């Protein structure tokens, strides 16, 4: 596994776009005996994903907001180191929401796997996952924590500078007023000045800004502006 991780790191160092990164991750997954790969960047309800999972499963995942109950994401946040996972033996001990998730995932050949998480900016977690259709697939060899973290960090860095449309995420819809208030905030206008420009009260501007921040899953206004800009919302 160390040699395969080293090779992945080497290939990722030469990756400059979505296509080369996708190819590198797919090759790595196949060499390790897995069927799928998935990279997710998550915090609270805000999740971005890049994977070769079936498009139908990706639609179901976001439509059902499975990022909020996904046991792999929960474990990644808690452990922050590589770990194996499997739905086998856990189905009956899980909550109804998790059982629904397991059943849906199983239908698309996602039953067991290996996940490699790292902490990233603004309290986010990035996770590189390899998934298998086998009930409890584990390849031979120990996982080198440092190499695994390096590989995940390199995927994160490459995709962070990619076109925003590269990443699949749950739809975020902002109202006209929320977009207006965020746009003026992005231009450095205070809430008082924004209120004067839009002809509304300062408390109303705060209401729209807070609403936009919550929808975007941002903890700060600067992060909300960054996310809205990256997604082309303002």
Image: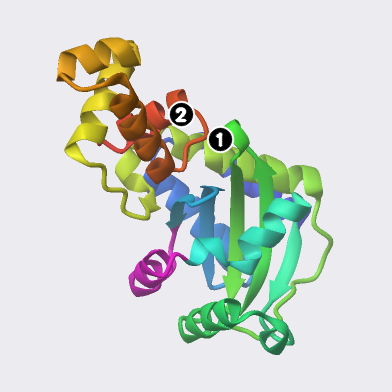
Q: Which mark is residue 76?
A: none
| Residue 194 pos. (x, y %) | 25, 16
- Range covered by the magenta-colored residues: 51-65
Q: Is residue 137 left or right of residue 14?
A: right
Q: How much space separates mark 2 and mark 1, taking CA atoms? A: 28 Å
- Res 162 seen here: no
Identify the element where label 1 is drawn: helix
Residue shown at 38% from the left, 53% from the top: 169
Q: Which residue is mark 1?
A: 13
Of residues 188 and 124, the one nearer the viewer is 188
- Res 25 seen here: yes
Of residues 37 and 47, the one nearer the viewer is 47
Q: Which residue is mark 2?
A: 223
Identify the element where label 2 is drawn: helix
Residue shown at 30% from the left, 45% from the top: 165
User: From the viewer's perspective, is residue 29 above or below residue 99?
Assistant: above
Q: Is residue 184 left or right of residue 82?
A: left
Q: Quadrant location of the N terminus? A: bottom right
């Amino acid at each position: 596994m160390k040699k395969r991780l080293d090779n992945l790191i080497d290939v990722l160092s030469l990756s400059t776009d979505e296509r080369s990164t996708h190819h590198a991750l797919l090759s790595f997954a196949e060499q390790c005996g897995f069927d799928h790969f998935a990279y997710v960047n998550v915090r609270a309800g805000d999740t971005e994903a890049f994977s070769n999972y079936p498009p139908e499963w990706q639609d179901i995942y976001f439509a059902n907001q499975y990022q909020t109950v996904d046991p792999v994401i929960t474990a990644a946040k808690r452990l922050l180191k590589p770990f194996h996972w499997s739905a086998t033996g856990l189905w009956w001990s899980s909550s109804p929401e998790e059982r629904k998730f397991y059943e849906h995932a199983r239908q698309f050949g996602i039953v067991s796997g290996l996940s490699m998480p790292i902490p990233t900016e603004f309290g986010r977690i990035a996770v590189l996952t390899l998934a298998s259709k086998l009930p409890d697939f584990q390849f031979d060899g120990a996982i080198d924590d440092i190499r695994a973290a390096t590989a995940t960090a390199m995927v994160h860095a490459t995709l962070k500078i990619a076109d925003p449309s590269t990443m699949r995420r749950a739809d975020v819809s902002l109202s006209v007023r929320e977009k207006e208030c965020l746009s003026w905030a992005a231009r450095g206008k205070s809430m008082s000045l924004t209120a004067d420009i839009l002809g509304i009260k300062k408390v109303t501007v705060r209401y729209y800004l807070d609403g936009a921040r919550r929808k975007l899953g941002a903890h700060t206004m600067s992060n909300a502006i960054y996310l809205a800009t990256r997604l082309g919302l303002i």
